[in-house]
Image (cartoon, grey):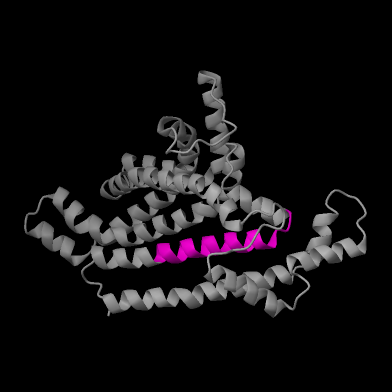
Amino acid sequence: MLAYTIRRILLMVPTLLGVAILVFLMLRLMPGDIVETMLREGGGNVPAHVIEQERVRLGLDKPIHIQFISWFGGILQADFGASMLTGKPVLHEIGSRLELSLQIALMATFLAVLIALPLGTLAAIFKNTIVDHVIRVISIAGLAIPSFWLGMVIILLLLTFYGWIPPLTFTSFFEDPWRNLSQLIWPAMAVGYRYSAVATRMARSSILEVMQEDYIRTARAKGVYERLVVARHGMRNALLPVITVIGLEFAFLIGGLVVTEQVFNLNGIGRLFVQATTRGDYTMIQGLVLLVAVTFIMVNFLIDMLYAALDPRIRYK
């Protein structure tokens, strides 16, 4: 187990290096001159020598391999460079928004697990009954309804009955926990509903498959209570694919809440991604892509570790 863990950690290095090279080259291969686009964003006429001076200042006049070595060398020293637009450090810009996106992702995950496991289990136990049909309708609706539309409905209801509108500024949990939770619980619910729908369907399918196994029939033949059969033998073995779905959805939420953040007036990672992409901020895009890549890699690593803890049949060597 220890050898496997070390090997997985070492494999993260070439994976991140490959992501860094790929995103760096793709941005440089995009058509057009990013410096010219930025300087002429307002529609004015910028002299050619000013554009060239800006290219030199940003280091874009150097050969592409020199640019990559300089950028990646800075990453190894925890220096992701400065934003081309604001001039502020990339880590500072990301860090100021990461708390918000991370908290929404965690709250949405908690709500999804709280909803999905009981509903998925009930749907599997009462297969093809009215309970199963109702739960399937709820889960299908969660997959069909966009999170941003549900967010707008939530805001409309809160505005109509309580006069609540999304605040203009984000309040950190460490400053005012109550104000923070009252602000973020609504986007977490909007996102968590779809999240729970995916996990509910996976839980139902997985539990139904496990309940057909021979060891389940053996436990029933021994006279074990059905509740214990489901909880001790069924759910534990059915959790593996559910954990995979939950983990991947969580990683997606870190940078994938673009429209939901716009609806609730939240300045998170998703919104920063859109701003950096539309305005051609190379260094910011590179930093954000690496953040998402690290999140997915770490989540997959934790999922693999949980597999071994939940299923004794799995042994990593």
Q: Is residue 131 left or right of residue 73?
A: left
**Residue 288 painted magenta:** yes
The residue lying toward the viewer, choosing from 104 and 117, is 104
Q: Residue at x 73, y 58 (%)?
A: 280
Bounds of the magenta span?
279-300
Residue at the left extreme of this rendering: 222
Residue 177 quadrant: top left
Q: Residue at x 68, y 79 (%)?
A: 65
Residue 123's x, y, as percent? 31, 46
Q: How many marks?
A: 0
Q: Is residue 178 above or below residue 5?
A: above
Residue 10's x, y, as percent? 41, 77
Q: Is residue 174 above or below residue 125?
A: above
Q: Main secondary structure of the magenta part?
A: helix
Q: Is residue 234 left or right of residue 188?
A: left
Q: Residue at x 64, y 74 (%)?
A: 70
Residue 214's x, y, as percent? 18, 66
